[in-house]
Image: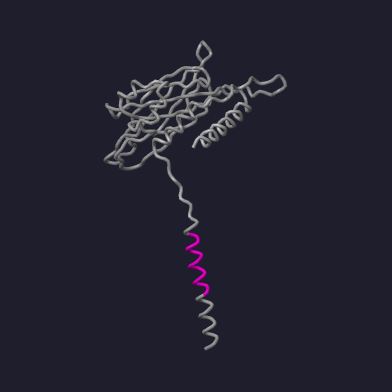
């Protein structure tokens, strides 16, 4: 009987400890605040304006890879055609706070000069009620003036009420040219919506050797720290 009493007492202490521990854990839960769509767009557009130091040419004693590549940042948004058609680079602050614009994607792509690359982002199989970004195609080439011409193709999967395979798609294209690290702006009508258009902000870096890639990565880290310091 005494043994049962001691066991019951021990179980009671364990249960009490579990209850206290559970309450303590609940008090220590950290809640993450998810930024609103407008806050996310504002941070990305702020990053698009961030300027990295110019890439220095390789020194005489360094071993260059002789790469002919381009690192490209894309900021894709869609919104009313009237808003997109009048957008200017000087309007970025206003665009960041415009609730009618929706951020679609912000990918980074590395491609060879004079070569077309394609990247499939998300492929929906089966029934879908809305259009979605499906594939990006990028073809950078050097102009006679030495700047880079960016040819961009954006493919959407269209609404697929019957789930037919493959799902129907439609592509819109745009061409932009500018200097390295110069923010470029392009726009094109959405193929599946007459009243809405696609807005693209594009920035590129030329890559000549592996040090250039390291330089860009370090710049992206500083850009992120800069964004966090402003919050």
Please state the horizontal and vertical placement of residue 124, each as a whole percent of the image.
Answer: 36, 40
Q: How is the rendered protein coloured?
A: one colour
Image quarter of residue 221:
top right
Please state the horizontal and vertical placement of residue 218, each as a whole percent of the image.
Answer: 59, 32
| Magenta span contains residue 14 | yes
Q: Magenta segment, which residues?
A: 13-25
Query: Looking at the image, is 148 positioned above or below residue 97?
Result: above
In-front residue for pair 200/118: 200
| Magenta span contains residue 24 | yes
Outermost residue toward the top?
Answer: 144
Please state the horizontal and vertical placement of residue 150, each as a whole percent of the image.
Answer: 46, 20
In-front residue for pair 210/82: 82
Q: Residue at x 52, y 22 (%)?
A: 181
Please state the horizontal and vertical placement of residue 194, each as a whole percent of the image.
Answer: 27, 26
In-front residue for pair 141/213: 213
Image quarter of residue 184:
top left
Majority secondary structure in the magenta region: helix
Q: Is residue 85 left or right of residue 4?
A: left
Q: Residue at x 50, y 56 (%)?
A: 28
What is the count of numbered marks?
A: 0
Outermost residue toward the bottom?
Answer: 1
Q: Is residue 14 left or right of residue 164?
A: right
Q: Is residue 40 left or right of residue 85?
A: right
């Amino acid at each position: 009987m005494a043994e049962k009493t001691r066991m019951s007492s021990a179980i009671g202490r364990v249960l009490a400890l579990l209850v206290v521990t559970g309450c303590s854990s609940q008090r220590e839960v950290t809640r993450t605040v998810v930024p609103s769509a407008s806050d996310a767009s504002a941070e990305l557009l702020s990053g698009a304006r961030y300027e990295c130091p110019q890439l220095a040419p390789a020194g005489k004693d360094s071993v260059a890879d002789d790469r002919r590549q381009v690192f490209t940042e894309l900021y894709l948004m869609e919104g009313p055609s009237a808003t997109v058609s009048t957008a200017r680079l000087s309007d970025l602050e206003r665009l960041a706070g415009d609730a009618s614009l929706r951020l679609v994607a912000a990918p980074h792509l590395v491609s060879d000069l004079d070569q077309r690359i394609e990247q499939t982002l998300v492929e929906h199989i089966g029934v879908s009620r809305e259009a979605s970004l499906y594939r990006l195609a990028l073809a950078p080439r050097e102009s006679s003036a030495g700047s880079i011409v960016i040819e961009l193709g954006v493919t959407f999967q269209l609404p697929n009420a019957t789930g037919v395979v493959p799902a129907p798609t439609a592509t819109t294209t745009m061409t932009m040219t500018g200097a390295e690290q110069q923010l470029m702006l392009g726009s094109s009508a959405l193929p599946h919506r007459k009243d809405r258009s696609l807005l693209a902000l594009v920035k590129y870096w030329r890559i000549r050797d592996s040090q250039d890639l390291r330089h860009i990565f370090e710049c992206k880290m500083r850009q992120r720290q800069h964004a966090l310091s402003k919050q």
